[in-house]
Image (tube, helix red, strand yellow):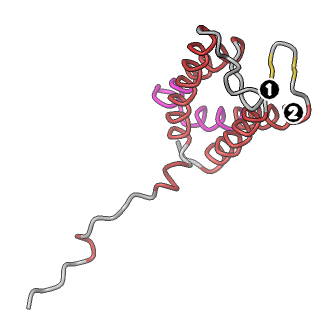
Amino acid sequence: MPSPVPMSEYATLPDTTRLLLEPRTYWRISAFALAATALLGIVLNAIGQGALLAPFLAFDWTHNVVHAALAGAAFLFGFGRVPATAVRAFAVVFGIVYGALGILGLFVADLGILHLELGENLVHIVLSAWALAAGLTGKA
């Protein structure tokens, strides 16, 4: 009869929950999501379809520029040589800003040059919770 394999020789699955709460992981995923959102918005606006999903979600040039700039910052925090304390701190700052924007947008849809639809508000609130969780609990 063969001897049992020691437990240490079995492959173990990574702790994906813990990985998702790491600030650099948050920034890396956010970088690609923001870049894709900016690119989608630019293309939709260029072909005159920025309001394709309105009133739930609309793409305007202001949001496209903001998403592109945030994507650049997210790539920097996710992949750059930025100290872990800064990576965590900016996740908290972005979490607070996203949360405030999402909640404010539920009550005030038009903030001058920035227009917030329900879909954007929900995404901002979810990203806020994730950013705060990563920034406050993660190790970067």
Q: Earlier in the sequence, mark 1 or mark 2?
A: 2
Where residue 7 sits, quadrant-wise, is bottom left
| Residue corresponding to mark 2 | 104
> Residue 76 magenta-drawn?
yes
Residue, x 67% and y 39% (percent of image)? Answer: 127
Where residue 117 sits, quadrant-wise, is top right
Q: Give the range drawn in magenta.
A: 74-93
Label ID, residue 8 = none
Q: Which amino acid does label 1 sit on?
A: Leu
Horizontal side, residue 136 vs residue 1: left or right: right
Horizontal side, residue 57 vs residue 42: left or right: right
Q: What residue type is labelled 2?
A: Leu
The overriding secondary structure of the stretch rendered in magenta is helix
- Circle 1 SS class: loop
- Measuring from the top left, give residue 30's x and y in whole percent: 56, 33
Q: Nearer the viewer, residue 106 or 30?
A: 106
Which quadrant does the N terminus fall into? bottom left
> Residue 58 magenta-drawn?
no
Residue, x 87% and y 21% (percent of image)? Answer: 110
Q: Nearer the viewer, residue 63 or 18?
A: 63
- Measuring from the top left, give residue 88's x and y in whole percent: 61, 38
Considering only vertical position in the picture, is 138 above or below 90? Answer: below
| Residue corresponding to mark 1 | 116
- Circle 2 SS class: helix
Considering only vertical position in the picture, is 70 above or below 96? Answer: above
Is the residue marked by circle 1 packed among few (<14), some (14-19), or many (20+) residues within 10 Å? Answer: many
Q: Which of 114 and 77 is in front in this view?
A: 114
Mark 1–mark 2 contact, CB under 8 Å?
yes
Residue, x 55% and y 39% (percent of image)? Answer: 26
